[in-house]
Amino acid sequence: MLAIVIVTSIAGVAASGETVTPHVGDSYEITMIREMAQKSSDDSTGSSFDKDTIIERVIEVRDGGTEIEYDLPKSSAHEEARDWMFPVRFLRPQTGSLQLLNRAELEERVDKWLRAAKWTRDVCGRWIFTWNAFRIECDPQVAVTTIEAFDLSEADLRDGASYRENGALSTGILRKQKASAEGETFVVQVDADPDAVRRTRAESDVAIGEMLQKPVTLEAALLKRAEETVSGTISITFETNSTGVVRRRTKVTELRTQTADGLSKTETVTQTLERRKISEPTTSQSPKG
């Protein structure tokens, strides 16, 4: 898990698929909160809470797409020792994938960041624990993949539309739960894929082993996790604003696990991704075309 998780959404795409024109100077605060609660049959419990925030700003509106910058908020605890990824700029074309615009700049920043920490690129890809557990990333491409993974606009929000969620056994069907002048709410529930859960846990075992200097191979971790019986559901709620743009996504994953020694546990992970506008364009900030 990265120390700072980049999360965002396509600016100006409505649930109906209608494009809402972005404007230069539009700024949004994007916050992801992840809460976990766990309880075992031996009465042991556990919980965790993580919150990450970034700022999205429209830099330029072109014929071929929109240039967007993402940065940490000024009040961030990381302000003095900024993550090398920020600020990062993308072109979001009208069709197709995100295009990273300042790759060369990020490459220079990561080299400076490594030197400041007295590290070489040999540490890239390793897990460490400081104020949090995180993987040392040195490839600018990780910004693209993380953003795509948390894109609020991926769903085609229509009553009865099919929906595919990573980590699910199959597709689900979206249902409109609520409609008002303030916006609409869509819900979907799918069964969790036990193999995907076991693999995620095995990858975590490898990371923990590395941090504790007790290395374990992924193959060994997968074999150990294969002894577990896993079942559960993933429930997702999308909330749009009055113009149909998704403003909040809440995903609740409920898992039940039975270990080989008879211990059972339940785990509930609630992930909330919310995007809210924090500034409007000024009269001097007109779209460029």
Image (cartoon, helix red, strand yellow):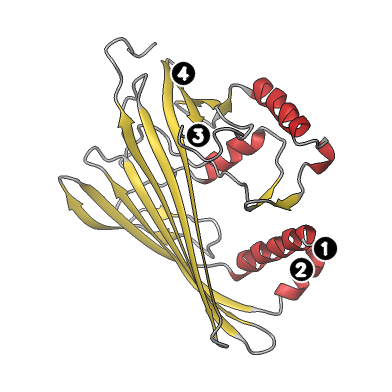
Q: Which residue: 50% across, 31% down?
A: 71
Q: In which quarter of the image is residue 271?
A: bottom left
Q: How far is mark 4 from mark 1, CA to CA?
A: 45 Å
Query: In the rendered image, which residue does mark 1 sit on?
Result: 217
Upstream in sequence: badge 3 or badge 2: 3
Upstream in sequence: badge 4 or badge 2: 4
Query: In the rendered image, which residue does mark 3 sit on?
Result: 72
Upstream in sequence: badge 1 or badge 3: 3
Q: Which residue: 65% across, 34% down?
A: 141
Upstream in sequence: badge 4 or badge 1: 4
Is the Cβ of the residue at disc 4 closer than 8 Å to that at disc 2? no
Q: How far is mark 3 from mark 2, CA to CA?
A: 35 Å
Query: In the rendered image, which residue does mark 4 sit on?
Result: 64
Image spot of residue 221 (x, y percent): 76, 68
Q: How far is mark 4 from mark 3, CA to CA?
A: 27 Å
Q: How crowded is mark 1: few (under 14 residues within 10 Å), some or many (20 or more)?
A: some
Q: Which of marks 4 and 3 is in front?
A: 3
